[in-house]
Amino acid sequence: MARKKVQIRDHSFEASLFWRRALFCLLVVVVCFGALVTNLYHLQIEEHKQYQVRSNDNRIKLVPVAPNRGIIYDRNGVVLAENRPVYSLEVVPEQVKSWDEPLKGLQQLLDIDDDTISDFKESLKGVRRFNRVTLLEEMTEKQVAEFSVNQYRYPGFSVEGRLKRYYPYGDAMTHVLGYVARINDKDLQDLADKDQLSNYAATHEIGKLGVERYYESLLHGQVGYMEVEVNNRGRVIRTLRFEPPVPGKDLYLNIDLGLQLKAQELLAGHRGSIVAMDPHTGGILAMASAPSYDPNLFVRGITSKEYNKLLHSPDRPLINRSTQGRYPPASTVKPFMALVGLEEGEITPTSKIWDPGYFELPNVDHKWRDWKRWGHGWVDMKKAISESCDTYFYQLALNLGIDRIHNWMTKFGFGQYSGIDIHEETNGVMPSRSWKERRFRQPWYIGDTIPIGIGQSYWTVTPVQLATAVTIMANAGVYHTPKLLMATGSPTGIIKLPPEDKPEVKASPLHWHEVEAAMRFTVTSPHGSAHKALNDAPYTATGKTGTAQVINIGQDEKYDAKKVAERHRDNAMFITYAPYETPKIVVAVALENVIGGGGSVAAPLARQVLDYYLLDEGHLKDDEASHD
């Protein structure tokens, strides 16, 4: 047999193949190692800061700390809105071995209802066991004391305190201060729109109405932060840095608490408003609206039943009548009409008209009646104001025309927002040709102008507007914007705010004097409409009464308050300032649906306000008191 040929191995080729493969593997290793180094460089050098931040975010947390809300005081330093400590019963779940026995014991000890226990058990679901959970909010002093004595029996449970807004004078200050309540979705959106959301990171309540809402930015303060280190489960290990919050500013209002309480007391049983102002500054000394409600209901969380009761009450306690109540001003505007008549040359202090008890236009059957059916006889300006002669002002309004009346009355703030520092305000109506065209799509008729002369028809005012106009009268044209805020407080001291003025109402000094003298004559004249209420006062007061019709009375009908529905009775209005020579206080009163008029019902209330401020509180010295 032939033998197979043995192939000899090619060592040179094998060596070459080995080195090629080795070089390829080396190249792969170098490429991979290069990629690894490149990636490490990218992670540890280029992206170092980013990943360090991410690491710190997992390890370090910023916990917001809510600032203390500013305190609100009256002009004399009496606290009107404060932050009171409230106590809650809280528990750390991981420190409780079993729930049944401690919850049963606490329920009996603290008289906790079944619903609260049930809600607490629900709140435990999904909560980290080292985080605190609230069992009972706003504990009473008795509950705090009883738990404190027995705390050793309940490991993991503790009483924790925090501050909550409280209004010590309840419903007497509601329509001035407003209230704070829990932040809702609308509030969050508003804060986001204003780029202020981050400043409320730890805050649960925000101003909803009144001063609390208007000065929210001052009262709230600046949020603080606590930088803490946490573990991978989120448990706080230690505090690294603490940046304390900046408390909100304290506010000092122009309100005189004693006067406010007096005004609220006088309004008991009425629907209406009393506004008192300082004519030198425009400061609101009192702004009472009745009926009212307790703002603390909203702070602690009002129930649906309680809220619906307020919302659907026919007396509308939620409305701030001082700034949102719209009333026909009635005869309280006669001094202003007289000033316009003097300035426009339509009357003089001595010019007279004959008043037969009514006013009529030629060839018109309708008669505009005077409140005094048999008339006042011959009437000049002084008598027309003091005895409130309607016929005189019917004629004056006709002579002036609506255009000149509107032009002048807007200077006094009628039909305008007063500028008072709360959001809840309406501007009333100072009618004009254009206003009626927009509102009713009708032209202005002569018959529309005549009742304007006595503050009726379409004309409506708020009590704050009326008080502001009287302040202008008392100042002979100087126009101070009504203000609730007098000063702000901070650790560096109290900063008093200057008066905020509007353009002066310019008129002849003689004409100012003539009208003011007529308002004084309303008190001193035996026939004056405010004589009974103020003539015997130990100070010199002025006044002007007003009785506003709520419903129209037929030509041949006679109004009898006792025979009409309660809501159809007249409103009683009154304005005054005192002392006459150097005014220190202006008062406007508006009472809804009363039996009696401005002189018999509203004026006596204004008298008591003046007495309290000028006599009881000593704002009028003995040597300044005078009499006729």
Image (tube, rainbow, N blue to C red):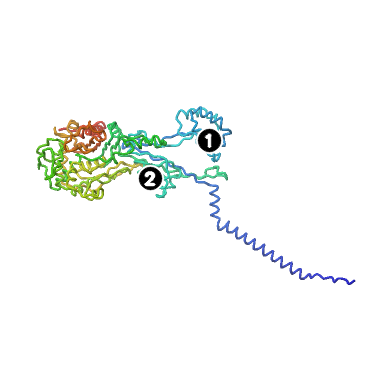
Q: Is residue 398 left or right of residue 6?
A: left
What is the number of callouts on the image? 2
Q: Where is mark 1, residue-wise? A: 121
Q: Position of residue 124 (x, y in %)?
A: 53, 38
The quadrant of the rendering that contains the N terminus is: bottom right
* Residue at left offset 55%, top offset 42%: 235
Q: Is residue 340 visible?
A: yes
Q: Quadrant of the C terminus?
A: top left
Q: Amino acid at mark 2?
A: Ser
Q: Nearer the viewer, mark 2 or mark 1?
A: 1
- Residue identifier under label 2: 217
Q: Are marks 2 and 1 in contact (CB under 8 Å)?
A: no
Q: Nearer the viewer, residue 577 or 596?
A: 596
Task: Check the image and report above or below for 575 versus 433.
Answer: above
Give the CA separation, mark 2 to mark 1.
38 Å
How busy is the neighbourhood of tag 1: few (under 14 within 10 Å), some, or many (20 plus)?
A: some
